[in-house]
Amino acid sequence: MLVIMKLNASSGSIDRVQDEIVKLGYTPKPIFGEARTVVGVLGLKPLRGKQHLESLPEVADVLEISTPYKLASREWHPKETIVNVGGTSIGGDMVSIIAGPCSIESYEQLKTVGEAVKADGGHFLRGGAFKPRTSPYAFQGMGVEGLKILKQVGEEVGLPTVTEVTDTENLDITAQHTDMLQIGTRNMQNFTLIKAAARTQKPIFLKRGMSATVKETILAAEYILNEGNENLVLCERGIRTYVDHTRNTLDVSAIPAFQRLTHLPVVVDPSHAAGKRSKVLPLSLAGIAAGAQGVMVEVHPNPEVALSDGPQQLVPADFKELVDRIRLVAEAVGKTVN
Amino acid sequence: MLVIMKLNASSGSIDRVQDEIVKLGYTPKPIFGEARTVVGVLGLKPLRGKQHLESLPEVADVLEISTPYKLASREWHPKETIVNVGGTSIGGDMVSIIAGPCSIESYEQLKTVGEAVKADGGHFLRGGAFKPRTSPYAFQGMGVEGLKILKQVGEEVGLPTVTEVTDTENLDITAQHTDMLQIGTRNMQNFTLIKAAARTQKPIFLKRGMSATVKETILAAEYILNEGNENLVLCERGIRTYVDHTRNTLDVSAIPAFQRLTHLPVVVDPSHAAGKRSKVLPLSLAGIAAGAQGVMVEVHPNPEVALSDGPQQLVPADFKELVDRIRLVAEAVGKTVN
Amino acid sequence: MLVIMKLNASSGSIDRVQDEIVKLGYTPKPIFGEARTVVGVLGLKPLRGKQHLESLPEVADVLEISTPYKLASREWHPKETIVNVGGTSIGGDMVSIIAGPCSIESYEQLKTVGEAVKADGGHFLRGGAFKPRTSPYAFQGMGVEGLKILKQVGEEVGLPTVTEVTDTENLDITAQHTDMLQIGTRNMQNFTLIKAAARTQKPIFLKRGMSATVKETILAAEYILNEGNENLVLCERGIRTYVDHTRNTLDVSAIPAFQRLTHLPVVVDPSHAAGKRSKVLPLSLAGIAAGAQGVMVEVHPNPEVALSDGPQQLVPADFKELVDRIRLVAEAVGKTVN
Amino acid sequence: MLVIMKLNASSGSIDRVQDEIVKLGYTPKPIFGEARTVVGVLGLKPLRGKQHLESLPEVADVLEISTPYKLASREWHPKETIVNVGGTSIGGDMVSIIAGPCSIESYEQLKTVGEAVKADGGHFLRGGAFKPRTSPYAFQGMGVEGLKILKQVGEEVGLPTVTEVTDTENLDITAQHTDMLQIGTRNMQNFTLIKAAARTQKPIFLKRGMSATVKETILAAEYILNEGNENLVLCERGIRTYVDHTRNTLDVSAIPAFQRLTHLPVVVDPSHAAGKRSKVLPLSLAGIAAGAQGVMVEVHPNPEVALSDGPQQLVPADFKELVDRIRLVAEAVGKTVN
């Protein structure tokens, strides 16, 4: 940390700042400029006391120069993490494809999609059983029955599964029925939930909050790593901006940012940002071109009657084309779709 | 709803849209323009099928013209709600003052603040026992011990209490120790939690999500009202914008918007938007001038050593000045601080 | 400035940074931490070379700790500026009211409004002659004929006038017909225009850009002050956010921010943020409660037929009520409406 | 347009709305729902009167269902535009590469870059002579001398040129020295300038405003097309969001949006969104993968001493790699780099 004093701060105030830094267990190192003094705060302990220092007299600002996370940081852990989910890997130079319906609606629906995903080259089957919905009048998911269908279809078609866990009450039952637990955008900072999910030791698929910064997302990842669970995938899924031509704005620049700052695999989810089927393809390809190590897309056998997110779900034929085109772009950027 | 067809859509497509509207249980009413047809969707049932209609051939757009909420709507419930919390009211022409520390840190700390809040004209005592924190290394709250202190101090100083509930696991114990349950900004769309909190029948203090729209906030309120709990207060606490001179941007225009669209009391929380003590006063007064029926502020006997949010907490002397000035502005806009 | 080196940067890189700081004419002062080195950049010259230092090997970041503006800065110029416009002052403890139609449409229209503004306690008459419009098919203003009407009506009713200048071509003629030149939100960073406007030595009314930061706004002000024109008023008029219930989000927190960082008067313009007449009153009062030294509002004798911005313009009777209520709130915060 | 009446609006109000629609020259078509009436506004004239209708009694809302632009609209002009700039085309299935320094600093600098751009496969040479800068103390460009260098180097290396025009005063001289006029992000709604630039009949390179919506950008294009100039290229260059890990957020979804809504070529400019050299490559590739028909990047022989935007400029060796990789991704999405 660096404590920036106000212009012409008194020597008394500067002394006070140094005393407080010592009390916090750090070493102060002042730089006396011609008009302004800056006091460096030296020490390797996790950062504490920023707010205290900010509140001292004649302090103009306190800047953090270290990252507030360690376990997620590539500076501290240069080796890239490859996540293993039920025998299938995500990360490195591979591009993984995670696909399935927004909501699980029936065995037949999921089986149809699951077979298409498997046949067309997908690696993971997704499907929502507990659905967080903006309106209380919208379809809220099949619940445990949906989980059972997911487990059964995953085994039948031979794909590891991913599903969202929405609260601690349904965590155990969800963990028993899936290979990877998804934390949704609305729950990225539901710290009780993410810690409990991490403790199941299931692989975690962590979606960026829809107005989270890159740093806040990495701190949420830090919560998970701090529970001893290192099977963690980050997902960029679009952020809230003033823009009105899409539901959310896919922040492709977050992909190289996460990869530079952390050692974790990064997947792109274009469906929620696109809002419409026709944009899922260009946004998927953009994500891969920007370096994403996977794509999560929504596929439904008949989106016109889907109980949620119909307009953004692909039909199986679209999905096949998507995989083919992802393969071409992945190769163009030196990656492989297995 | 209105279904907007594409320019020069075929009569087959227009017929198809009308058939589907009938299947959904509504009545279609087309308007044939010179270049474009619009089909009205008539019926009083809760809206369903928007996504389905959007996915039909040659449909350009589907517009909702009714609000997606009913129980929260002032159009349907013109009478203003006054919320009763432990014998003290919020709403109408009163301005309520809710104050206390960000985190409960000890009996002595809360007692000091509670006495000051009571003496200086505050109406409710707040204090956090379970703290959702961005970093896993930050102070996470005293937990149940903090709840006990809150209950005791509330009774001793004679103020009803408010505290945040962060998950369903600590909901019951929290409900037993406080007069009003706060749903924090990160949990506004934690639907499992808000429904469970509503079912306790305790009054609910619902903070707007930090990137929630007014409509999404009202839909979260609808979840609570839909559980039969009408003791509900909305709180504007600042939103995430590109702005970097404050932590969040207090959206004062949301106050009259909530009051026009719903029948619920609206309180302003300037502390998190301000980020710094010096801005708490102007933002509080701005909120009251815009019509807020209450202010929630953070007060700490010694913010310099606070375990969370030190820089934005007021000392008791600041609080007294704040109440005095709120009183003046409240009177200027025709309201009363009791 | 402070140059933050990467973790365990080599001594060669640190030396290189110091050499480059010397070449830029500053004095380097390194602080060697246990894992990371920071090099302070000392000297009182205007800041230069930030980008150069950022591009050096093993530099993690370069932080500015001084403000990039001097003439606008309250740190350097503590005395508050009172701006004089045609004999009428803006600033200090006064609240000034600037009112008039969005667009000047005829002599009769402006005369009616001007008389109402004068009679009801307004201090300045505004009206647009050159209108920047999003669509090429919208009314673009009366041009020079409008300017003549403004000048005539201003003199007849005895109010100094304000009008927007939209380009350097109409600058001279505009300056000849008005007492204060308004720079609109779209032109805040039209540097050619703001410098030329400043050089007329007319008082300048500078609106914050609709996505400008506080710092960028102050830098635009710095351009004007740098031309030797100190008759400058800042205006907060709402910013672009994800919010969809108003046209723009009035950032009331910018008012105390501008007042703390600069010595310039700050006026609030609620009309564009509100978008609707019913929100103009609460947002005006919120701005005054937050400390604004004036309000600019749109008034039209018959908004239903206005050629621009009809829905947000007040009728004269609303305006009278607004002035009365502003007076009450201004007094509640220790200010005066003359 | 559609006029949405309030719940249970009186028949008098509905009649009044219909009368006003007739007065505006359109035909009203009401749909009487059970609780709410909607009045369609029929007619093919450019839309007028929206604000007027909004201001009538018991009107809840007025919705536009036609696009407010015609000349730019693909609905009206399905054929894709190929822009010709000095004999070189932009648009269709080609990917064009526009490269050069942020600012022209000397003949030698531009010649070095120009030769590299030509040798490595670039199609256009860019360079700024008039620089709009946030701070008055930053380098403001070489002005006319820079234009002369640009013209000379363009001719010597055999590349058409692009440069930004910042005001009407330097428009003529700029138009005389370059093949395409760039309108920068800060000037997208400087309507005086864009109309005047359009009238030179030079090809126009229009950058999206940094907080402009897709619709506002297309309306700015409409201004240019409305002057009879159809040589127009749109450019996505990043928008302002709450995100702090990049300078701006590249909105890749705008690329397919512009292509669906208009018939104009779309180019991506990743440099300003990236802010840092290391992100220019992934964002360029993301833009191409999303369908962009060109890339504009900044190249400098020695970015460490650049007078503006050093950190985001590529060195010639980076540029060569960028072109090679763009070529691969372009082919993967069915496009060609000539």
Image (tube, coloured by chain):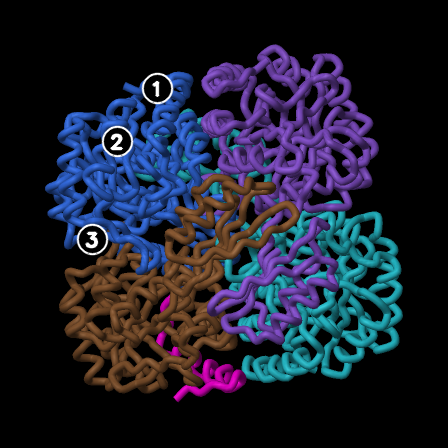
Chain colours: A brown, B blue, C purple, D cyan
Residue density around tag 3, few if under 14, some if 14–19, many if 20 or more, within 10 Å = many
Q: Which mark is residue B167?
A: 3
Rendered location of residue A38, percent (x, y): 55, 51
Residue density around tag 2, few if under 14, some if 14–19, many if 20 or more, within 10 Å = some
Q: Is residue B28 toward the left or the right of residue D311 in the image?
A: left
Rendered location of residue A88, percent (x, y): 30, 85
Which residue sits furthest top?
A: C119
Tell me which segment is drawn in magenta: A312-338
Q: Secondary structure at mark 2?
A: loop
Rendered location of residue C62, percent (x, y): 59, 60
Q: Secondary structure at mark 1?
A: loop
| Disc 3 and disc 1 on one polypeptide chain | yes
Relative to the observer, which residue lies in front, B149 or B176? B149
Residue B176 position (above or below residue C45):
above
Relative to the observer, which residue lies in front, C273 or C215? C215
| Quarter of the image with the N terminus of chain C in it | bottom right
Which residue is at a point 19% across and 28% down the rendered structure image? B159
Q: Amino acid at mark 1?
A: Lys
| Quarter of the image with the C terminus of chain C in it | top right
| Disc 1 and disc 2 on one polypeptide chain | yes
Evaluate whether residue D56 shows in this view.
no
Q: Which residue is mark 2?
A: B77
| Chain of residue at mark 1 | B
Q: Secondary structure at mark 3?
A: loop
Rendered location of residue D104, percent (x, y): 80, 65
Q: Amino acid at mark 3?
A: Asp
